[in-house]
Amino acid sequence: MIREFALNDVYYLLLAARWTLALTSLAFLGGGTVGLLVALLRVAPFAPLRIIGAGYVNIVQGIPLLAWLFVLFFGLPILAGVRVSPWIAATVAFSIYAGAFLGEIWRGCLRAIPRQQWEAGASLGLSFVEQLRHIIVPQAVRVAIPPTVGFLVQLIKNTSLAAVIGFIELTREGQLTTAATYRPFTVYIAVAAIYFAICFPLTQWSRRLERTLRVAR
Amino acid sequence: MQHVCGGRRIGTARMKYTFNFRDVWSQWDYIAEGIGVTLLLAVVTMIAGLMIGALGAAARVYGRSWLGVLVTGYVEMIRNTPLLVQLFIVFFGLPSLGVRLDAMTAAFIALSVNLGAYSTEIIRAGLEAVPRAQIEAGYSLGLSGAQVFRHVVLAPAIRIVYPALTSQFVLMMLATSVVSQISAPDLFHIASIIQSRTFRDFEIYAVIAGVYLALALAFKLFFAAIEHFAFTRR
Amino acid sequence: MSLVELHNVVKRFGTNTVLDRVSLSVEAGEIIAVIGRSGSGKSTMLRCINGLEPIQEGRIVFDGETVNDPATNLRKLRQRVGIVFQSYNLFPHLSVERNITLAPRVVKGMEREAARELAAGALARVGLADKIDAYPDQLSGGQQQRVAIARSLAMRPQLMLFDEITSALDPELTGEVLKVLERVAGEGMTMMLVTHEMGFARRVATRLIFMHQGRIWEEGRASNVLAKPRTPELETFLDAVLH
């Protein structure tokens, strides 16, 4: 039975957007953890560690996110014996994916700190980890905020792919609503508008942060 | 839609699973077809995206303010909404407005429009990085605006943003996988067809992932080669 | 009729008046040296003559055409006015030949072979014939400036403007550029040079103009003006420059 596209449907779309944000948060937490690890690996003074980090980034970034979703969705039950719901598959896939990108961004920020800072720390007798912790990372964090916020926007958009493995978020809800109302144009424009309403302010914020950072230098 | 049903496992019994890649290899000719379509999509999109990007960037940097606003509007709309949704709007949405497109055409349009927006931003940064003195020298020689753009500004600008632009291109090549969701016969779509034939879910997607990785590497090498031959002299 | 005429030209950047009712007339064949402090308006005056900067009041006339008239085809005009800037604005992505042949080919439609010959001729005039296939980053500052001069000369302008073209050069490279300028002057080119090279101005210029706070403060034969400054501002300036 076809129903009309009404304000009610917009309401359900908005509710589904909650799951978009929830998945994004989980992915950011998971990806952030992985990303931190990757960034540290890539600046480690030990070549094999750097190679592992580089390998991880290149492999993850060289495979489409859709493929990661499917490989994990079908592979986790086999490889890890876990019962896999769309939530778990999506969270793991996004964490792996985000981890590679965040790792690259954060590595760039660590490297942006001039060599003299490291040397100053070393001359004070600090170990590599201590230099990192007390001198480099605090400065790198400031530099990292604008691109990280920018990536957050990417992440929010990427969660739309989770629809493909049945995860109920904004895009999937859009598909279901289209099936019920037969108004694909209206529905998807509404979906796009909601994504825009979430992403655009973040994009602007990221730009503003970048500008203040540049002025401050 | 994709094979959600096949993926929902209810029982937790850990099944003894034998990996069988041979079934996947036997479908190699289909995989090759899929690769062909993916490459076609990628290359056409890159060319179209580059042209849209150059025009959009020029409009932003040199055009009248209303034109700049238009371009900014376009860029912001694309960059703040997911590619998948853009694809759905073009393929599923436009027919309600009377424009009926087949999957491949819709795919080309959505992908190009998407890449065009990102390229506009990247190339714009490049244009703004060309020193003003060069542009003045061009004008002072009697070159018109279009001539200054083409001979004095464009090449150095692209050289500056080449790394950022080509990584965006590689990402786009990987992102072409979304067109599988409107049943365009790309590599990812072929994967799902093979999956429904062989029921080797994991193997097929693992293989496809590997193929994409190889394609990404190939593109990176290709772009590096171009950089070496076009931009580095003697 | 003079080649260049400025009538009560006023130029402002925002609230800052950079040219304050400047009037000047330049005959064909003259070599005008323009001196003054930074901010006195000298570079701006040059840039207004070929239309790089718009003016707010007054008229600039080049060979009978009003430069600041919106109806004037600036492109055509700029083919007859050459300008060389202080920072070497050779196009770094093009070879010396392509730098020089770009405008002749693209603007005048010249054929590739003819353009290359033209470039070779222009380079010979500045003493760099052997550098025709080099790239700007392989040349010294003085060589780059000489190529910039050749690039402007290749368009056969009626007037050449030089905006402090030796100021950014190492001292030992200045000489080679000044020699080229003397040669071009000797060939009868009408030239306006913003310069700090007083010796050169005295030797080569037919007229010297001292600008101060956007006005022409003193003007006359170079040797006279430099030897007998009539105003305290010029005295102070010469003291500072010639110490």
Image (tube, coloured by chain):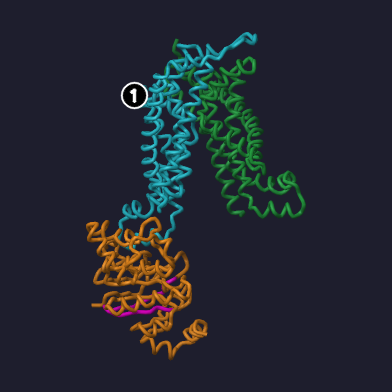
Chain colours: A green, B cyan, C orange
Q: Examine the rendered structure and indicate whether residue C137 appears above or below residue A49.
A: below
Main SS of residues in magenta:
strand
Q: Position of residue B69 (x, y in %)?
A: 42, 44
User: Does the image show residue C27?
Assistant: no
Is A171 a magenta residue? Answer: no
Quarter location, residue B187: top left
Segment colored magenta? C18-35
Q: Examine the rendered structure and indicate whether residue C198 appears above or below residue C134.
A: below
Q: Is residue A18 left or right of residue A127?
A: left
Q: Examine the rendered structure and indicate whether residue B9 appears above or below residue B102.
A: above
Quarter location, residue C202: bottom left
Instruction: Give whichever of A172, C169 is nearer the camera.
Output: C169
Work out which residue is located at the far right of the displayed protein and give it. A125
Q: Position of residue B126 (x, y in %)?
A: 45, 49
Q: Secondary structure at mark 1?
A: loop
**Which residue is located at x 42 percent, y 26 percent?**
B89
Judge the density around disc 1: few (<14), some (14-19), many (≥20) Cα neighbours within 10 Å: some
Instruction: Give whichever of B48, A216 is nearer the camera.
Output: B48
The chain identifier of the residue carrying mark 1 reads: B
The amino acid sitting under disc 1 is Leu
**Which residue is located at x 60 percent, y 29 percent?**
A96
Task: Say which residue label 1 marks.
Answer: B101
Instruction: Give whichever of C233, C178 is nearer the camera.
Output: C178
Q: Position of residue B1 (x, y in %)?
A: 47, 17
Q: Examine the rendered structure and indicate whether residue C86 appears above or below residue C182.
A: above
User: Does the image show residue C102?
Assistant: yes
**Number of dots carrying numbers:** 1
Q: Position of residue B75 (x, y in %)?
A: 44, 39
Quarter location, residue C20: bottom left
Is C32 a magenta residue? Answer: yes
